[in-house]
Amino acid sequence: MTEDLRAMGPDAGRSAVTGDVYDPRTILFHWLTAALVALQWVGAHYIDAFPRGPLRVDARATHICIGVALIGLLVLRLAWRTTRGRRLPAVAWAPARYLAVATHWLLYALLAAVLVAGVANTWIRGDSLFGLVKIPSLAPGDTALRHQVEEVHELLANTLLIVAGAHALAGIAHEVILRDRTLRRMWPAARPR
Ligand code: HEM
Ligand code: HEM
């Protein structure tokens, strides 16, 4: 297998050869983000299942608070990545490597866009956080704008989920079919060989 990977290009299968893994903080940031994004997407679809009134307001406030935590997490993650976080070359032959890198940046961009649209959504509609903090509406009574921003937020969230799903399948295919340790190097229990 190692010989196959070497035949694909100079950096191909580098982790298969060296046994590189990401550092624990990068791994923590990655999986915490993935778990919270999944929780947000599923949870958002249950907000309207609560009866109108305080319960629905609290469900929305929970969605907003987890969203704000994700903003903090993304900032910390990017700060770590650009300073001390370990970066590994994508393990694949050249064209697929560009696709992997482009997908990773698309994921960061989509995540940032969903979060910004979520904040805009909250500010335009106005809200209450568990009855403790009141967020005034920036466009009171403008239901058309409110619906538009809500739709943009939902569309971006759905796109993020689709791209993340394709990215996850690619990671699994690398591990199971190409056996180049791509998934294992982002796995919490991974140890350098
Ligand atoms: C990756 C993070 C996020 C994901 C995946 C996500 C996903 C979604 C989805 C799918 C909906 C539409 C639910 C529906 O009506 O069927 C929604 C609604 C909403 N989101 Fe997010 N969201 C995220 C982050 C945020 C953030 C950061 C905020 C605000 C700070 C936010 C505020 C809202 C609000 C206010 C609604 C409208 C809820 C309602 O009226 O029922 N979201 N979100
Ligand atoms: C919402 C969910 C997810 C998001 C937003 C996401 C985002 C990302 C991003 C941005 C990177 C690039 C890291 C960097 O270089 O800074 C990455 C790497 C990676 N992700 Fe995800 N991911 C998600 C879910 C998953 C899932 C479910 C899997 C596996 C089943 C997975 C497997 C991997 C692997 C193996 C890498 C390392 C790839 C490499 O080193 O070439 N990710 N992810």
Image (tube, rainbow, N blue to C red):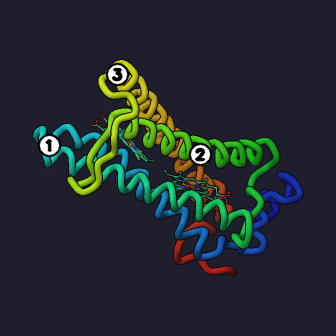
Q: Which element type, helix, strand or loop, lies under badge 1?
A: loop
Q: Residue at x 33, y 45 (%)?
A: 135
Residue projecting furthest to the right = 10
Q: Are there few (<14), some (14-19), or many (20+) residues within 10 Å of tag 3?
A: few
Give residue 89's position: percent from left, percent from top. 77, 60
Residue 131 falls left or right of residue 84: left
Q: Residue at x 63, y 68 (%)?
A: 185
Residue position marked by numbered label 3 in the rendering: 142
The amino acid on which the numbered mark 3 sits, given as a three-letter code, is Asp
- The CA distance from mark 2 to mark 3 is 31 Å
Q: Is mark 2 within 8 Å of ligand 2?
A: yes
The amino acid on which the numbered mark 1 sits, given as a three-letter code, is Phe
Give residue 164's position: percent from left, percent from top. 52, 45
Give residue 65's position: percent from left, percent from top. 36, 55
Relative vertical location of residue 50 with respect to residue 191 in this rendering, above or below:
above
Asked if residue 184 shows in the view, the reply is no
Q: Specify the quadrant that holds the C terminus.
A: bottom right
Residue position marked by numbered label 2 in the rendering: 107
Asked if residue 15 shows in the view, the reply is yes
Q: Residue at x 62, y 80 (%)?
A: 191
Q: Which element type, helix, strand or loop, lies under badge 3?
A: loop
Q: Residue at x 53, y 50 (%)?
A: 168
In this view of the protein, which residue sits in the foreground, 70 or 126? 126
- The CA distance from mark 1 to mark 3 is 24 Å
Q: Specify the quadrant that holds the N terminus.
A: bottom right
Dot 1 or dot 2, earlier in sequence: 1
The circle on residue 28 is none
Residue 99 falls left or right of residue 166: right
Q: Are there few (<14), some (14-19), or many (20+) residues within 10 Å of tag 1?
A: some
Ligand 1: image quarter? top left
Dot 1 or dot 3, earlier in sequence: 1
Residue 127 falls left or right of residue 122: left
